[in-house]
Amino acid sequence: MREENPGLDVVVTSLASDAHTWNLVYLQLVLEELGHRVVNLGACVPDSLLVTECVRRAPDLVLVSSVNGHGYHDGLRVIAALRARLSGTAIVIGGKLGTDGVDGVRERAAQLVAAGYDAVFEDGTGMAAFRAFLARLRPGVRV
Amino acid sequence: MTGFGRFVAEAAGAGGLVVQPRMGFGSAGTMRRGLAAVRDSGTLAVGTITLDSYTRVGSHDTARAALAAGDHLNGYPIVAYPVDTTRGVIDGIAANGFPVQVRHGSALPQDIIASSIAAGLYATEGGPLSYCLPYSRVPVSEAVRAWQESCRLLADLQETGAEPHLESFGGCMLGQLCPPSLLVAISVLEGLFFQRHGVRSVSLSYAQQTHPEQDAEAITALRTLAGQHLDGDWHVVVYTYMGVYPRTPHGATALLAEAARLAVRTGAARLIVKTVAEAHRIPTIAENVAALRIAHEAARTARPTESTLDTGILAEARALVDAVLMLDDDLGAALVLAVGMGYLDVPYCLHPDNPGRTRAFVDRAGHLRWSRLGALPLRGIADAGGDHDATSAGLLHALSHVERRFDDAAIEEAALPLG
């Protein structure tokens, strides 16, 4: 498997208002164990820094992870700026995206995909679905 | 109004454990109802206004826009609201018998502290390392300057006869997988920083970790070092577990009760509680009040007991504190140097200034231990190593150690045929 898959360049990031990082540390380890190369932007990444770093590094995948309940709103805001510069890059978002737990998961996902994300992984089924998504991804190609 | 520190000291003198929620709501009306419910909870409580994360990072326009759009915020936006709104929230509630503290998480808190002071709220928390390294990307040097200014804002109130209070959040540092000696050292250093910058009434924190006996040793070490370094009014506050929280109501409740007993056993004066909803969403007022009552009851069954365990936490913490203090007479400059040199290096912390050369793990006995010391000045003092799994699965296992211990016990208890 490893020989066939040259690995992806992945940017792992939080959003502007989200200070949580264990999710980011864990995702970096998962991705590295699968043979991918990770740049981890860490906590509270302002929109402008996220866009600049993604443009500069030209990754195959941008993985946005947020667990503070503001991910839906912050994620909707930043995707427009990201898509303006990175139309062909796979960009996904996951975590706990609302303040109301599992209520509203489907509506949030539909809105986020409509706004430009390639996939949305909310808590619960998130990691398994994300691994399946990752397995289909090839360098430079959106799924 | 009686200061926060004096209220806690008087309660502790009478043998009671002060309990406190981590409660915050975006709606001013809900925030006021929440504070009233905490005051009327029948416990020995102080109130909390926890701020939202837009306010924490200084995005007050985003917070205002969210309020205008009627969106849910994950806390109270104290800067975005007019000062009269906040006065209205606490009017007739924050009083002699019920001090209220603002909890925020900001590395650059000057505007938060100014808004709090304007509304008459003089107790808050954080610190130049504890609210910088884990939760921001602000350079440590900038956070140090911001906290010097913040201390000055609070210290100036003392001329008016008020008693501002500042709590170090240093006992948390990412909530889990930071060995106790580093938590103790950062708490002591931040408490000393506050006092050197004029704030006389301070508290030092310690967050419950993976093992109650190790935690008791750590809090004893914290009190020993605080007694040697601090003047005036100080107390210790314990945080109920700040890592991955049990999902079952039984498990969540048992972990909270263990934290309350830990606080009483070790002579801590105050406890920040967590709720049964913690693993799932922002807790309601009722869930916060229920948690205060559980903690209050658990505290009543516990007695102060001297911890005689010595696995070296005091020696490690003392070595860290002494090494940092030796770096510069100006403690702010010493903190910046200490992070730069790796004398303070928080495991798994992604902050651009954090050296990131230390690692920790949970050993078979459930103790939190160093696996890599980086450049910490602990050679010959701390052991590093042992058998552990440094993969993503291993990390997840360590992060969920406490959650599993309490949830598994809850599930086993529920499964017993005769209850």
Image (cartoon, rainbow, N blue to C red):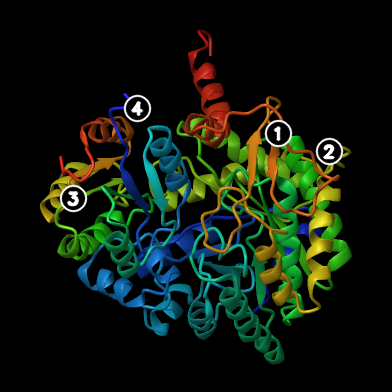
The chain under label 4 reads: A
The chain ID associated with circle 1 is B
Q: Are marks 3 and 2 on the same chain?
A: no
Mark 2 lies on a secondary structure that is: loop
Q: Which residue: 60% across, 75% down?
A: B141
Mark 1: amino acid: His
Same chain for the residues under marks 3 and 4 in the image: yes
Establish whether labels 2 and 1 are both on one chain: yes
Q: Nearer the viewer, mark 3 or mark 2?
A: 3
Mark sitting on residue A2: 4
Percent x, y for residue B145? Answer: 61, 80
Q: Are marks 2 and 1 in contact (CB under 8 Å)?
A: yes
* Residue holding disc 3: A117
Residue under mark 2: which chain is it in? B
For marks 2 and 4, give the one nearer the viewer: 4
Would you identify the image quadrant in which residue A121 lies? top left
Residue beneath the point at 69% across and 58% down: B342
Give the alpha-carbon distance from disc 2 to disc 4, as whole Å. Answer: 44 Å
Residue tagged 1: B367
Tell me which chain the residue with mark 3 is part of.
A
